Image: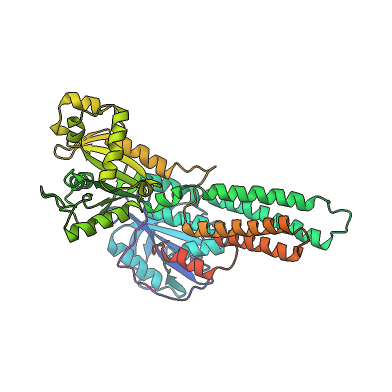
Amino acid sequence: MNFLPTLRELNINFTRKIFLRYASESTIFNLSSGYGKCGVSVIRVSGPQTRDTLRAIVSKNFVPKDRYATLRSLYHPVTNEMIDKGLVIWFPGPNSFTGEDSCEFQVHGSLAVVEAMFDALGSIPGLRLSQPGEFTKRSFFAGKLDLTEVEGLADLIHAETEAQRKQALLQSTGSLSKVYKNWRERLIKCVAHMEAYIDFAEDENIEDDLLEKLKTELLSLRENIQNHLNDHRQGEILRHGVRTTIIGAPNVGKSSFLNLMCQRKVSIVTPIAGTTRDVIESFHNICGYPVLFADTAGLRTLTDDVVEKEGISRAKDRIGKSDLLLLIVDATELSKRKITNKAFFEGFKEQYLKELGITTDLLSETSLLVILNKVDLISSEDLEKLKNLDVALVSCLTTKMENLFQKMEDKLKYICSQPTADNPRLTNSRYRQELISCSNYITVFLDNYTTNPNQDLAIAAQTLRKAVKCIEKITGNVSTDDILDVVFRDFCIGK
């Protein structure tokens, strides 16, 4: 049998969906992963009836060995007809992904084999198809994962680039969870000390400077949270894709550049200036980073065409929402003006942007990369001089690219950064909102403590409890049904 060492997540459109209310006592099954007809499919079962299911499919006398792959013939429990011969693995709870008794059937990957296995499992009383994300939901309720790890696992399943995979893997293995749990523990300790002071303020065992120490700890904690928030949204940008807008004057080769990057005709290219009127998007993996390209209308300040004016307006609106701007410039313009040193080039770039109607406020939060197109039209001598400038050199006509991908990779690394286990990135807007609220509650407490030392300490303690709950909403330590629905509904069927 051609069993492959790694398995990818696979959504299958032939799965019969049974929408039943979630019940922890039920036993569920579904297709976890597969490689199609020439590979292997993995069908997982989880719940209290898993051992009985194994015996029904394999043999009544089958005694599975914990976490050990066994090659067995698999049979339909009603017809007793052999379905396939595959690997069977037994994972007894609580040492399993879901925390329950679980097993895997690794069978040949054809649709017919998987359908036959589903029919066999569906004939066993008490078994049902899992809902999307239900295996992971059971893992969460069993305390195997917290919400940050769950969402990291979802990101890992949907990762399209190497950088996304690395970030999601860090989160799914608990890098963010450790940070937030540490903050929660510190906040809980502060609340406990506050309540101890309220209840035993006159007790000789309570330190006189306890409130001052509490203030110092909260100041430190708030600083940690603010530093985590001041990340320029690097983790979120990497998670969703770097919004990259291609800009420039009409007919400098913006649409040709997008077609070159996509290796197909995405945008219409003609000698007529102003061909592109709307924003045309295309998503690609560039140097391991997710990049959402947007081709825009050529920018110029003088035009009487109403449609072109609207296209320019949309282009400028897109510029303000971009993470990276690719400014396409005709290389022959620099060659004619004899611009070969960095000082002259910076002056040219500033004037060029002004002529395009791009103000500095549009560029304040955006990285800019200048790309000189049509280098095939300049002399080799001028080309060598242009290499000294901080630009990328391309020819969309001849598909020549001089240091383009290296320049783009440098920009993408700067925009997305490189998350590490010791310094994980904030990846979710939900986390950001809760952390902002948490920081605000700490600020309210500190401000009240500074301006009103005689304040009601019971009310002050309640403010800190609200800060704790903000962290708990991120990790899932409190009942948050609305959040859970959002988190788990995006999982694919087999998870």
Q: Of residues 133 and 322, which is closer to you in this image?
A: 322
Give the left or right position of residue 64, taking residue 389 as reference.
right
Give the left or right position of residue 306, taking residue 97 as reference.
left
The answer to whether residue 427 of the structure is visible from this angle is: yes
**What x and y, as percent, mark residue 190?**
71, 55
Say which residue appears at 40% left-offset and 65% top-offset: 30
Say which residue appears at 61% left-offset and 53% top-offset: 181
**What x and y, as percent, mark residue 421?**
52, 43
The answer to whether residue 52 of the structure is visible from this angle is: no
**What x and y, as percent, mark residue 371?**
26, 38
Give the left or right position of residue 493, taking residue 179 as reference.
left
Question: Where on the picture, by quarter, is residue 461?
Answer: bottom right
Q: Say if 223 sits above or below 344 in the image.
A: below
Q: Of residues 292 and 305, which is closer to you in this image?
A: 305
Q: Say if 131 sits above or below 376 in the image.
A: below
Report the span colored magenta.
10-18
Dominant SS of magenta comes to loop
**What x and y, as percent, mark residue 456?**
76, 65
Say which residue appears at 39% left-offset and 64% top-offset: 493
Say which residue appears at 84% left-offset and 60% top-offset: 200
Q: Looking at the rendering, in which quadrant would you find the C terminus? A: bottom left
Report the label total.
0
Question: Where on the picture, by quarter, is residue 458?
Answer: bottom right
